Image: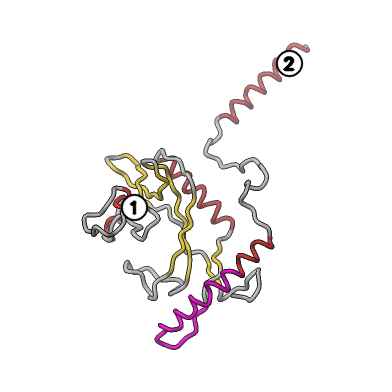
Amino acid sequence: MKTQTIQRLLLLSCINLMFFSCQDPTTHTEPPYEGPPKDHIISVDRAQEMYDAYSQRRVPIIKKYEDSIAADGSNFTPTRYAEYDLETIKQYIAYIEHEAKEAKVDIQTLRFYLSNYPDSDKFPNGDTVKYPKRNSFFVVPTMAYEGKNVGFYLEEIDGVYTALPINRNGLRGKDKNQTQDEPQGSVNEAGFFISTNSATLGSGTTSVILNDGGVAPPPGTSDFGDNN
């Protein structure tokens, strides 16, 4: 009787093991907690110091320039932060990891580019400009390419999902239109995209660039004082 009971328990254990092993392997689980990221967490005091330095050294310059070119005489309020809800960040991480896996490429870093919305109601493709003239940033995942760390987008080439450098012209050296005195392009210089032809990043390509978070002020208040 005892032997039969043990055999039944073993059989049930095997069935359970087989059942759980057949579950969807793509189910996302939280990564193990390993404490704060080393060398990347700063104190509140240091954050305050850095915030104040920007307030003193950058905000007045931005405001003076934007006020000087405002046709309607309006006063400009420089952006002090942009934010995303936590679920959006989690979804973005899951998205770029999925796309990178499909293209068989490893994500090296997330690169945050400072940027500015145009002084217009619409982008050239007709999309609404959410925050005209406002400062912002966008996030670009990077990959290793020819010994460099570069931002990438994705494209299907001959049926193969492929990760390609955003600034391929810069990586390949001097552009044919570049003068002798101009430096060679690089991913950190002004020439960000492959070309000025909007069709280049059109149909058949997939972007992994994150933008359009909420920018403030206004509305909103700062965690570090002066409400701007």
Q: Give the residue displayed 56% in from the left and 42% down from the top.
A: 28
**74 falls in the magenta region:** yes
Distance CA(mark 2)–CA(mark 1): 65 Å
**Front position among marks 2 and 1:** 1
Report the disc number at residue 6.
2
Position in image of residue 101 (x %, y %) = 44, 40
Q: Which residues are magenta?
A: 53-77
The chosen color scheme is secondary structure
Above or below — where is 146 with respect to 22? below
Above or below — where is 48 with respect to 90? below
Q: According to the image, label 1 marks what residue?
A: 167
Furthest residue toward front: 181
Whichever of labels 2 and 1 marks the residue nearer the N terminus, that label is: 2
Question: Looking at the picture, which amino acid does disc 2 mark?
Answer: Ile
Position in image of residue 184 (x %, y %) = 31, 54
Position in image of residue 218 (x %, y %) = 55, 76
Q: Main secondary structure of the magenta part?
A: helix
Helix, strand or loop at label 2? It is helix
Asked whether the residues under the numbered discs 2 and 1 touch, taking CB atoms below 8 Å apart as contact, a structural biologist would say no
Q: Give the residue displayed 47% in from the left and 56% down from the top.
A: 139
**59 falls in the magenta region:** yes
Q: For the N terminus, which image quadrant? A: top right
Residue 82 appears in which quarter of the rendering? bottom right
Furthest residue toward right: 2
Question: Looking at the picture, which amino acid does disc 1 mark?
Answer: Asn
